[in-house]
Image (tube, rainbow, N blue to C red):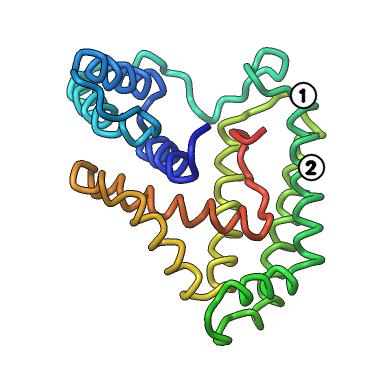
Amino acid sequence: MISPIDWALVEAWRAAGIPLHIVLRGINKAFDSYESGSPKFRKVNSVLYCQQAVEEAFSEWTLTQVGSAADDTKSLDQPEDASSSPGFTLIETLQFLQRVDRDLQALETDSESVLKRAKAELSSADTAASNHTLLAEAIRRTRDRLSELTKDLQKTERLNPEALERDLDSLDRLLLNEIKAACGDELLSRYRKEAKSELRTYRSKMEKDIYNQTVENFVARRLRESFGIPRLSLLYF
């Protein structure tokens, strides 16, 4: 099992555009180095152990791509045949969107209670819990857009996972920003301190952008876990 901070790092790698095969190459390199070293004073119990090797592998791979022609000339906007798109069928995607909408509906109904839970986590009474109306409105707009996406998919026999993922990612970021605004700075600061505490051993070896993204990903994950916010992404199919 990997920890929330590990998930945050993995999401930072994804946001940085590091391909899966490069991540696996870096992980293998890290374990090869571990196995060749001696003695073994500690176990590898975190993805963070592989962080530096993954970023080095990505840097090396990036250099090899300079000036090279893209092998895949297919546009990201070109629809995939739903019957051949790996991992995503039209029916399953519609079911996923409906499930997310149900979760959002429950969150919308309970938006005031969600923010009261945020207030309960804080040491002071000064919180933005009064923003529950704005939060409910953001959730409603998100649900409206999900409804439009669902209707569009129901009218077509072809699935474009990349375009749909971009739409979902945009909605996900919008909703998360509204949650952050509604919860207030004190709770966000607490979550950032948690992340920085877990990363303190690795910070000096991490690229600044990866470090900052990992911290923010950890904050986002803690918010989702605390308040039952569904993840709007096909990666969480």
Looking at the rendered image, the disc whose residue lies closer to the viewer, 1 or 2, is: 2
At x 61% / y 40%, what residue is drawn? 233
At x 24% / y 48%, what residue is drawn? 203
Mark 1 Cα shell of 10 Å, populated few (<14), some (14-19), many (≥20): few
**Percent coordinates x, y for residue 76 in the rendering:** 50, 28
At x 24% / y 33%, what residue is drawn? 52
**Percent coordinates x, y for residue 94 in the rendering:** 78, 34
Please, is residue 134 above or below residue 97 in the view?
below
- Three-letter code, disc 1: Glu
Query: As rendered, which of 194 and 23 lies closer to the eye?
Result: 194
**Percent coordinates x, y for residue 217 in the rendering:** 45, 50
The residue where tag 2 is placed is 99
Q: Is residue 211 left or right of residue 220?
A: left
Query: As rendered, which of 217 and 66 lies closer to the eye?
Result: 217
The residue where tag 1 is placed is 157
Q: Secondary structure at mark 1?
A: loop
Q: Quadrant of residue 68?
A: top left
